Amino acid sequence: MTAAQTRPTTRGERARARPREILAAARELFARKGFETARMDEVAAAVGVTKPAVYRYFPSKDRLIEALLEEDLAEPARAVVRWVDEHPGPISDMVAGFSERVEQLQSTGLTRRYLMLAMDEAGRRPEIAGFIRREVLAPGLVALARAFERAMTRGELAAGNDPLLMARLFYAPFLQTSLGAVGYALPMDDAVERGHYRAFHVAAFLRAFAP
């Protein structure tokens, strides 16, 4: 099937396709220029529409960023939470699988920029920061805590520890390597090095909380 055959032809088809076109253009523009530098009129120009046409679908830049966040981070993060909740064990397999899935999320182009917004809750976009913390970070921590609690019940992890604090401890290095190219003074500028770091962290965590 050719591009001409797949391109929307009727006014209704074009209208239904427009939000997807706007999101695709905004994603590319934000990846190149950042959320603060990129302007809504640039998004409109990339799509070939007027700025009011963009605002018809996304009333503000924050709403546009939230729509991208929902697709790029929140939906994949919910899938990871479901996977963690449904994992039967052992805990060593779960934490290794979680590590791999977080790496997949980190590999998307805008992940670092999204998480930078989450760390800037008192800054320019507090609603966006709150969205990321509420829809992405908090559910992941709670799911990990539930998994660690189940593992303690099965005797796979030492009993008597706070599972939520364990979840924070386990997740912190993954968040840190998402935010920068240097992870606790270790180079984090390529996937192989990040893989070594993740494997070391998983092994150290399991040793620290071994029964």
Image (spheres, rainbow, N blue to C red):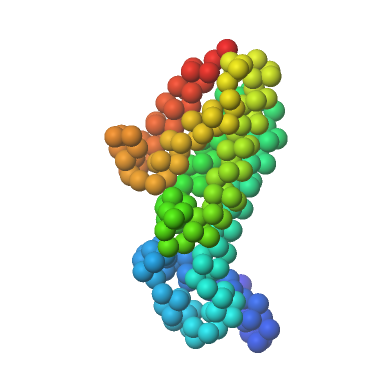
Q: Is residue 145 left or right of residue 191?
A: right
Picture quarter with the N terminus: bottom right
Q: Position of residue 175 (x, y in %)?
A: 45, 41
Q: Position of residue 171 (x, y in %)?
A: 50, 35
Q: Quadrant of residue 187?
A: top left
Q: Quadrant of residue 139?
A: top right
Looking at this view, is 166 or 196 the one in front? Answer: 166
In this rendering, is residue 200 above or below 117? above
Residue at image position (55%, 63%) is 66
In this rendering, is residue 170 above or below 109? above
Residue at image position (61%, 31%) is 145
Q: Is residue 38 left or right of residue 95?
A: left
Residue at image position (43%, 80%) is 41
Looking at this view, is 95 or 153 the one in front? Answer: 153
Residue at image position (51%, 34%) is 168
Can residue 93 be seen from the camera position used here?
no
Can you name the residue that lies furthest to the top here? 211
Can residue 145 be seen from the camera position used here?
yes
Tally of numbered tags: 0
Picture quarter with the C terminus: top right
Q: Quadrant of residue 88?
A: top right
Q: Position of residue 108 (x, y in %)?
A: 47, 53
Looking at this view, is 71 or 136 the one in front? Answer: 136
